[in-house]
Image: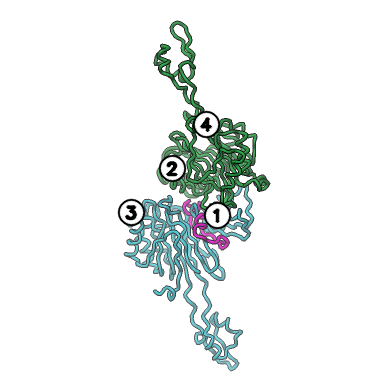
Chain colours: A cyan, B green
């Protein structure tokens, strides 16, 4: 399953039962956490997210509403006897805080906690299923966006055609990787005659907290689902800029530039109780926009699955 | 109003919708916070506790389930534009953590944050309404209990008797403070003939986290309400000792020693879903025991008010 569960959609001050930012990204058989505002460990329980599936946590920046819940997750993992390593990716400063908190509590974790400091754009993680890249966005303090991209899937084998072309079974995996086959007579069987293209890779991009910043579109090509912060409505554009945040309209303009399959907006200011205006404002610019609602899982779908 | 609202009654790992330790103590027109586990700021909202009444926060020790919610309260106070000073009392180490967290977030608070390091038994605060004393308890890391005691109330003036004795009105305040009156003829009017004793001072004592430690009873004389941790049931007495915690029976034995008006027990291990056994076990030793239940306010009553 590929999908994103919203654990918190509010900005700095929790309000109206909305929690600070935290997201769980289901990716094949893993769960990635993206930002961990206060209360995230309770939200994991609330939404039945299996902690054992979490091995990588990505923290965009060190404002409290994006990471105050991280230490609670780490210490609870320890109390629950976790043994598998935990990787955290965050801007400079986090490691010092976490190590200090563990030290004053005289806590020795039963697992290997690896905190990787993000300093610049680059690839944070790459394995069989996913590549995670980060890129700087523009906030009051150092802040990074993340892009999760499915590794290129193998081509789909048209088995009957391969049999008919006399290609031996041992070569099928190489066909899936795109190779042509040359038979005993020196005839070339072109790959595309016995396979079809791999499905387009799924991807998720997380852009928060940031001012409106069209130049990051270079990192956001062909994104399946794009999350962009929308702290204020457009009438508070100036306030958004002063506080290094975006408006709902600006988030939609970003989507207009980058053309993801769908846009998700969140990080709503606690001055707004009703969120409908955010949806209306964004959809006027980019119709395929959804509000990030706590507890809802937004599936990442390939175009054929999505039916759109 | 004098009363204690439970904001969290669970031990280390949140479970069954029970939150980590946090308590709000209503004291005349103020609210004291005692410990601030993760999510305390949401619990303040949930139970409609007025933040503007909070000027003093007491942290028993630096295990996360007792203070991870503090930084969220502090930063939210800042975002809400608080101006009045905030005093925090905690063992060594807290100030370094909080200042570091504010620094990496590039946060300048709009109010004066005073963090007072507790090193030994003594008086932390004394004003017209309250005296707050701390005393060491015994846990895996430095940990303190707290006692909140009402300052001695003035004696009650029996006005008719004072008039009959010919005592002038300007002297009434001195009568309330316990002075005798000497009239023009040199006759002494004994104070107790024109006043009655002040009501007994209300008090609240907080003892957590700690092993069973009868020697702290010296700090717990004539307590109105005594909270004592009870992490496990008595059948896990050994586990409790190893982890520097107490059992429900031990909490009740402490009350048997110290004879508070009422005992409140909490900090229940997340291994217990049902808490009734805690009540049963403690009441067998000290009948006037209650379970600390989230959202419930336990009033501090003078014996005449309590009707007991």
Query: Which is more toward the observer, B49 or A90?
Result: B49
Read off the magenta span: A40-68
Distance between the alpha carbons at the discs numbered 2 and 4: 22 Å
Mark 1: few/some/many CA within 10 Å (<14, 14-19, 20+): many
Nearer the observer: mark 1 or 4; the answer is 4
Q: Is residue A20 on the magenta stretch?
A: no
Distance between the alpha carbons at the discs numbered 2 and 3: 30 Å
The tag earlier along the polypeptide, 2 or 4, is: 2
The tag earlier along the polypeptide, 3 or 1, is: 1
Please give the residue where the numbered disc 4 appears in the rendered image.
B149
Which percent across, then down, holds residue A136? 46, 60
Please give the residue where the numbered disc 1 appears in the rendered image.
A73
Disc 4 to disc 3: CB gap under 8 Å: no
Q: Chain of mark 3?
A: A
Please give the residue where the numbered disc 2 appears in the rendered image.
B49
Q: Chain of mark 1?
A: A
């Amino acid at each position: 399953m590929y999908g994103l569960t919203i654990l918190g959609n509010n900005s700095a001050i929790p309000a109206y039962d909305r929690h600070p930012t935290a997201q769980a990204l289901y990716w094949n058989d893993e769960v990635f956490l993206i930002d961990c505002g206060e209360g995230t460990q309770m939200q994991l329980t609330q939404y039945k997210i299996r902690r054992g599936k979490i091995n990588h946590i990505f923290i965009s920046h060190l404002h409290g509403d994006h990471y105050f819940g991280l230490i609670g997750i780490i210490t609870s993992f320890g109390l629950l006897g976790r043994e598998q390593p935990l990787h955290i990716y965050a801007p400079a400063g986090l490691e010092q805080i976490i190590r200090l908190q563990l030290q004053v509590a005289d806590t020795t974790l039963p697992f290997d906690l690896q905190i990787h400091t993000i300093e610049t754009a680059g690839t944070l993680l790459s394995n069989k299923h996913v590549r995670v890249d980060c890129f700087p966005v523009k906030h009051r303090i150092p802040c990074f966006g993340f892009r999760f991209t499915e590794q290129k899937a193998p081509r789909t084998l048209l088995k009957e055609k391969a049999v008919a072309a006399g290609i031996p079974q041992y070569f099928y995996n190489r066909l899936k990787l795109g190779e042509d086959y040359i038979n005993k007579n020196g005839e070339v069987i072109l790959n595309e005659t016995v396979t079809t293209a791999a499905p387009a890779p799924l991807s998720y991009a997380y852009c928060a907290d940031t001012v409106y910043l069209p130049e990051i579109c270079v990192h956001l090509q062909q994104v399946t689902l794009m999350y962009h912060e929308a702290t204020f409505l457009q009438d508070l554009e100036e306030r958004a800029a002063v506080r290094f945040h975006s408006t709902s309209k600006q988030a939609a303009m970003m989507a207009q530039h980058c053309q993801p399959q769908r846009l998700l907006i969140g990080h709503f200011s606690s001055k707004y109780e009703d969120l409908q205006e955010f949806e209306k404002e964004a959809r006027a610019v980019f119709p395929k926009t959804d509000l990030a609602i706590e507890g809802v899982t937004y599936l990442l779908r390939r175009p054929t699955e999505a039916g759109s």
